[in-house]
Amino acid sequence: MGFDRRFTLVLIAWIAAIFGALLGFSLALETPGLAAVRIVAGLLVAGAGAGLWRHVTRTNRTLARFIEAQQHGDFATRFDARGGAGFAALGVALNGAIERLRRERETGLQELRFLEALVDDLPVALLTIDDPHGVRLANKAARRLFAGCEGVRPDDFAIFGATFAARLADTTRDGAELVILRLPGGPHRAILRAATLVRLGARVRAITVEPVQGTLDAVEIAAQTDLVRVLTHEILNSLTPVTSLSATAAAMLEGDTADVTAAREAVATMARRTAGLHSFINSYRAVSAAPEVRLQHFAAAPFAEELARLIRVDWPDLTLSTSIDDGLLLRADPDLLAQALINLLRNAAQAAGPRPDAQVMLSITAREDAVTILVEDNGPGVPEALRRDVFLPFFSTRSDGNGVGLNLVRQIVVAHGWSIDVVDRAGGGACFRIAGDRP
């Protein structure tokens, strides 16, 4: 980066002036009687030298003032390259760099203001702890939650709970935990999360406090409501065919042509189903416990035929077929397994729809050390994208469905140590496949 033209011309002029003044001063010294001329010539030499020095050092002075302004954060100052100061290209580059710094600083300040507002408006209370300042309530949520506490030591927060104050004082414990806060409205459970950060070389503890008592209460109520929905759904699934069978048995016993044998068979079926329903309800008495599986050996064929008889009560026009390996024994909980298969068979009957060609098939087969139970229908099938979702609680593809049946089926299957999935049926429709170990 070189000198500009004006700076060079002025520099040459000052040098020429110095040489001229020196020449005149030398001639005055050699000529007698020119004392006054010598003084004037000496002053001209001194003036020319001062002018040359000022011209040469002007760029340094301008640059020094410019840099000093930047050190004080004055990004509005510009490098003055006018008046022959020289280094015009340097001035342009410096001014461009300072303009970029000014824009970046403005952008940084805007981002900082945004982050400060974001932290201050977070719905989760934030506290910071460092050595010089102690505990600081860093946002509005913290100031609301701990209103009335003006202390800066962890012990000052003991009014909200000794455990909470101890966690504020503990500088080695990071992570999340559930603590009890003593708040004006009473004890509240809260999730406390702690992390250690470094700010300007100093350690700072950041702690968030999120009261979750209301959320936990809502979840608990929702869980209880869901449990009632599950039990209601399953009880009605079993009571509907029992009610129909009881009416059928009563009709069989009326009049002179009473069919006692058929009525006895219907009543026996009702008795077994009500006993199974009683056992099922007992297994769900404990809200927090999964259904208890009581394994036993039983014949698969009569078990399947009884389930088919129950389904035919509600869907007398449905073509329901069973295919059971001869002499096959199952090792399972017959009541829980019956509850699961009733759900699958009812879903299959609903999927096949009230059509003349509606078909449902229940098959139980054994191969080597595995047992496979299939419930198939010729309905529209289950789209592949939904095959994992259908087992989620309260997920249903029907507008009148509540989404609890298939979730319960999966719970029962998993409780047996088995697996269940849904695939396409050959010829169209859905096939729910249960796979388990052979006894």
Image: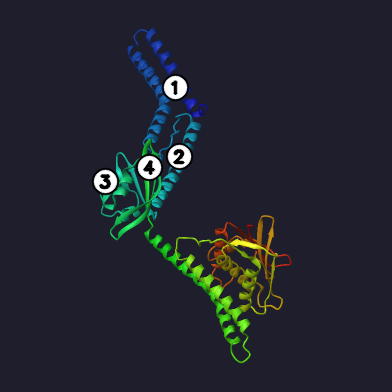
Q: Are marks 2 and 4 in contact (CB under 8 Å)?
A: no
* Closer to viewer: mark 2 or mark 4: 4
Question: What is the CA distance from the residue labelled 4 to the residue labelled 1?
Answer: 74 Å
Q: Residues within 10 Å of mark 1 (few under 14, many from 20)?
A: many
Residue 14: numbered disc: 1
Residue 381: numbered disc: none
Which residue lies at the image location 64% right of the left edge and 73% below the top edge? 308
Which residue in the protein does label 4 denote?
173
Residue 155: numbered disc: 3
Compared to residue 99, the image places residue 357 above or below, namely below
Question: What is the CA distance from the residue labelled 3 to the residue labelled 1?
Answer: 76 Å
Q: Nearer the viewer, residue 130 or 160?
A: 160
Q: Position of residue 314 (x, y in %)?
A: 61, 78
Indicate the amino acid at tag 1: Trp
Q: Nearer the viewer, residue 412 or 197?
A: 412
* Closer to viewer: mark 3 or mark 2: 3
Q: Residues within 10 Å of mark 2 (few under 14, many from 20)?
A: few
Q: Is residue 237 visible?
A: no
Residue 101: numbered disc: 2
